[in-house]
């Protein structure tokens, strides 16, 4: 399974004066295996520059548990709020194959940034994660 992440800072839903920075992230998961897989659950660790950490666990993504045939992809958008203008997310998806095999697909760390700049992993720059 491959994971592509496109983070975006949502200035119109943020209030820096109140310490609220809102981000959306669009994720595309693609099944590169030669058998069907189903995304069952997610686990996120969200850290911000103020030192605050959020842990999010739950079934599926955006209320769905997509079943992906070989070569299929699923794209969804979700979001989070940070207490600082910069932070990171990382985590994993729990996946089950059509053969009943269970495994975790790691989602490597990516950056959420309201500050822009030259960081290639900052918000708004697509990144393919494997």
Image (cartoon, rainbow, N blue to C red):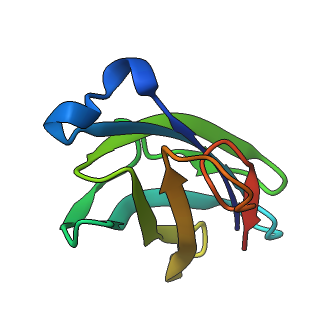
Residue 20 placement (x, y as % from top left): 23, 38
Residue drawn at (53%, 73%), measured in percent from left and top?
Answer: 109
Count of marks, rendered view: 0
Is 97 above or below relative to 82?
Answer: below
Quarter holding residue 106: bottom right
**Residue 39 relative to residue 79: left or right:** right
Residue drawn at (22%, 51%), measured in percent from left and top?
Answer: 83
Q: Quadrant of the N terminus?
A: bottom right
User: Residue reaching furthest front?
Assistant: 17
**Residue 125 relative to residue 19: left or right:** right
Q: Quadrant of the C terminus?
A: bottom right
Residue 38 placement (x, y as % from top left): 54, 57
Foreground: 36 or 62? 62
Residue drawn at (62%, 46%), measured in percent from left and top?
Answer: 116
**Residue 20 relative to residue 48: left or right:** left
Is 101 above or below relative to 4?
Answer: below
Quarter holding residue 2: bottom right
Is 42 above or below relative to 71?
Answer: below
Foreground: 3 or 46? 46
Quarter holding residue 8: top right
Residue drawn at (60%, 75%), measured in percent from left and top?
Answer: 99
Residue 114 placement (x, y as % from top left): 48, 43
User: Residue reaching furthest left?
Assistant: 18
Residue 125 placement (x, y as % from top left): 73, 48
């Amino acid at each position: 399974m491959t994971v592509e992440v496109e983070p975006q800072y949502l200035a119109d839903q943020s209030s820096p004066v109140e310490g609220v920075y809102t981000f959306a992230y669009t994720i595309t998961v693609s099944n590169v295996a030669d058998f069907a897989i189903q995304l069952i659950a997610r686990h996120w660790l969200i850290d911000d520059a103020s030192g605050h950490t959020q842990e999010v666990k739950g079934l599926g993504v955006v209320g769905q548990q997509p079943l992906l045939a070989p070569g299929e992809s699923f794209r969804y958008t979700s979001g989070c709020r940070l207490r600082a203008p910069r932070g990171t997310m990382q985590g994993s998806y729990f996946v089950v194959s059509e053969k009943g095999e269970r495994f975790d697909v790691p989602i490597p760390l990516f950056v959420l940034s309201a500050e822009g700049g030259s960081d290639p992993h900052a918000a708004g720059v697509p990144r393919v994660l494997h």
